[in-house]
Amino acid sequence: MNCVKCDGELKKVVLGEVEVDQCEKCSGIWFDLGELRQIMDAEDIEILKNKVDNNKGHDELSAKCPRCGGEGNMVRVTDLTHSDVHIDVCSVCYGQWLDGGELERLRSKGLFESAANFFKRLVGRGG
């Protein structure tokens, strides 16, 4: 498959039981339905870390879905708990695209929020 944001090619990357597609040029990652949730729970994502820093401006680019062959347009969605991360979602197959570096931001915030909620519960202040 071709990258949805640059002229790179998506290569298969296996992480545990999940196989995703990552651009060799901009480090963007394509997740088929349900794969992003599985990766968020994985212990080590070192293999998927942003390898390059040439994806400036990619967040603003609109794209056609690589899985649907252009039938589905990607819709940019902002996660309410991570306002600086925009997930591009296909309106047909519901696959998801993260630009290079966005997976690390999602996971680091998720770990921070989990730790904060744990300590709030520990001292009896909600969570």
Image: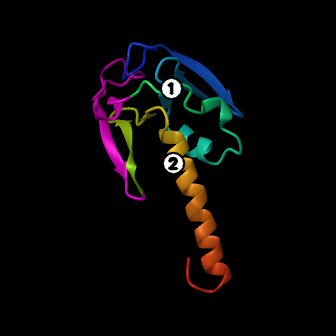
In magenta segment, residue 19: no
Pointer 2 residue: 106
Image spot of residue 52 (x, y percent): 52, 25
> What secondary structure is the magenta-colored segment mainly?
loop
Pointer 1 residue: 27
Image spot of residue 14 (x, y percent): 67, 27
Image spot of residue 57 (x, y percent): 32, 30
In magenta segment, residue 64: yes
Q: Secondary structure at mark 1?
A: loop
Instruction: Residue 95: name its quadrant.
Output: top left
Question: Which residue lies at the image location 63% right of the left edge and 66% below the top edge?
Answer: 115
Question: Which residue lies at the image location 28% right of the left edge and 34% below the top edge?
Answer: 60
Outermost residue, bottom side: 124
Q: Secondary structure at mark 2?
A: helix
User: Which amino acid type corresponds to the residue marked 2 in the rendered image?
Assistant: Leu
Vertical side of 83 occupied by 124: above or below? below
